[in-house]
Amino acid sequence: MEATAAPSIDYFRRIWTLRWFWYSLVENDLQARYRHSFLGIGWSLARPLGLTLIFCLVFPTVFHVRIDTYAPYVLVSLTLWQFFVENVTLGCRSFHSGAAYIRQQAVPLAIFPLRTTLGAAFHTGVALLLGLSVTWFFQGFNNLAALPWILPSMALLFVLGWSVATVCGLAQTHFPDTCYILELALQFLFYLSGIMFRPQDLTNNPMVAWVMNCNPLWSVLELIRQPVLHGQPPPWHNVAISLAFVATMATLACISLRKLERKLVFWI
Amino acid sequence: MAFIQFEHVDLEYPLRGPRITLKEYVVQGLFRRGKRAARPIIHALRDMSFEIGDDERVGIIGRNGAGKSTLLRTVGGIYPVARGRRTVQGSVCALFDIALGFEPEATGRQNVYYRSYLQGETPDTIEAKLPDIAEFCELGDFLDLPLRCYSHGMIMRLAFAIATSSAPEILLIDEVFGTGDLAFRKKAQERIKVFMKRAKIVIMVGHHLEFLQEFCQRVLWLDKGSLRADGPAKDVIAEYIGTVENAPRPVQAA
């Protein structure tokens, strides 16, 4: 009964066998998050909507863009960004929050970052529906033909989230300052991922625009922004960069998990 | 067929080094001479070899810190072995710290599901067991209240009822008899006897030597992480008691 190492087929089979366990943890997390809150799960919609309203009051004037294109852009971008942020910050605590279970039973540890990613994916899914509605409100139903592109793009984003949560969680167990450093890095990355503005809006700062185009996270976000906001499939160079980025992160997660998983119980 | 085999197993428990500040880290990094100091480790199990087969009831005894619970967790696959070979065949159920891993905001009934899912159960199999669990833990309407409303004794009752509702091939028990009040403790002991009869292999850690002698044919005596004796329960326990009683006592301060 030796534990199988990630990422073997048997390892994923064991994750699937425990599907009821991690599914119930996600369900409990979602219930606990908004317990006793007046809006409840409505905060999934209220938070990105509120931030979008604030941005729309300021930035259309600064960047000289129309509100009917800027509002859907910011809302969809914030939704996807929030997914990434939750995987980084909550991912850092994913193994610590599952410590009681890890000390009880030999389970594949990848289920704990998976719990984080599934919780974040739920909120992102709800908020993305709002993003679609806002886009339809301002721009009509021109994007319907391109919407099937969202599914593979979301799958890729999910793999990225799971990988990021795993790597961050493992790093946090060995280096407890990881979370603070990453929170700082996220502030920087926020401005380089085109959440508030697009590279073409930065006509007076081509250097920043160029750096944004080189940011692989920008390409991943474009996989969903292009079909939702412009009704067209994502450009192939964005697809290629995204695939390479996600593959790199997934490989890093698998290698780190394979190397560190068995001894992780000593560090939590 | 259930089977456990340990061949020259060593287990090393790494510890975090002393916490240093960023300034110390940078200074040490810049001016370090020679090799970095080795990370401190505890050699928790040393050269452990034994086999346990079907229908064996094995007790583990030893002083505090002898490695009893560590051995049990190593059998359960929770701790990785540093050297040697561990072979465990059969489904394992571990009753370690049974009150660990409960969700305080979820109801008792929801926690029954969570804990059972962790043991690989499905909604259908839990549904069938739920009446038995509810009846045994005697929590009544409390079962539908959040766990944060429970007393420690009530949580222990629930934990014990859930843990003993499965039918594993290998059962690992670590001192779980302090559960609830006196009446419930007696009930728990009866239930654990039935539970132990269902399992093919039972390994239990305890300081309750009479109970171990009654239910185990064989006892492993651990001393400072090593196997000091392995034999019939009566003989090993008698030898252990003799050693403890003859051990020199620390000098009392005047």
Image (cartoon, coloured by chain):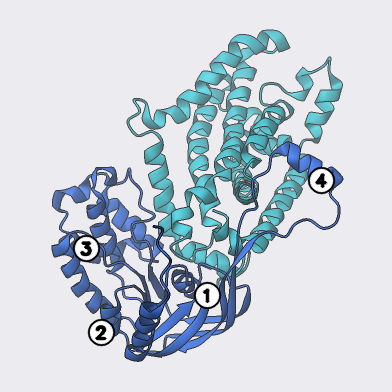
Q: Are marks 2 and 3 on the same chain?
A: yes
Judging from the image, mark 4 belongs to the subunit labelled: B
Image point (82%, 30%), residue name: A211
Query: Which chain is drawn using blue?
Result: B
**Which dot, 3 or 1, sits closer to the camera?**
1
For mark 3, give the secondary structure: helix
The residue beneath circle 4 is: B29
Location of residue A186 by image quarter:
top right
Q: Is residue A93 visible?
A: yes
Q: Position of residue A58 (x, y in %)?
A: 63, 10
Q: Considering depth in this image, is A222 or A54 the residue closer to the camera?
A: A54
Image point (77%, 24%), residue name: A199
Q: Are marks 4 and 2 on the same chain?
A: yes
Q: Are marks 2 and 3 in contact (CB under 8 Å)?
A: no
Q: Are marks 3 and 4 in contact (CB under 8 Å)?
A: no
Q: Is residue A216 visible?
A: no
Give, as a three-letter code, the residue at label 2.
Glu
Q: Considering depth in this image, is B246 or A183 the residue closer to the camera?
A: B246
Chain A appears in which tint? cyan
The residue beneath circle 1 is: B225
For the residues labelled 4 and 1, the Cα–Cα distance comes to: 36 Å
Q: Are marks 4 and 2 in contact (CB under 8 Å)?
A: no
Give the number of the disc on residue B214.
Answer: 2
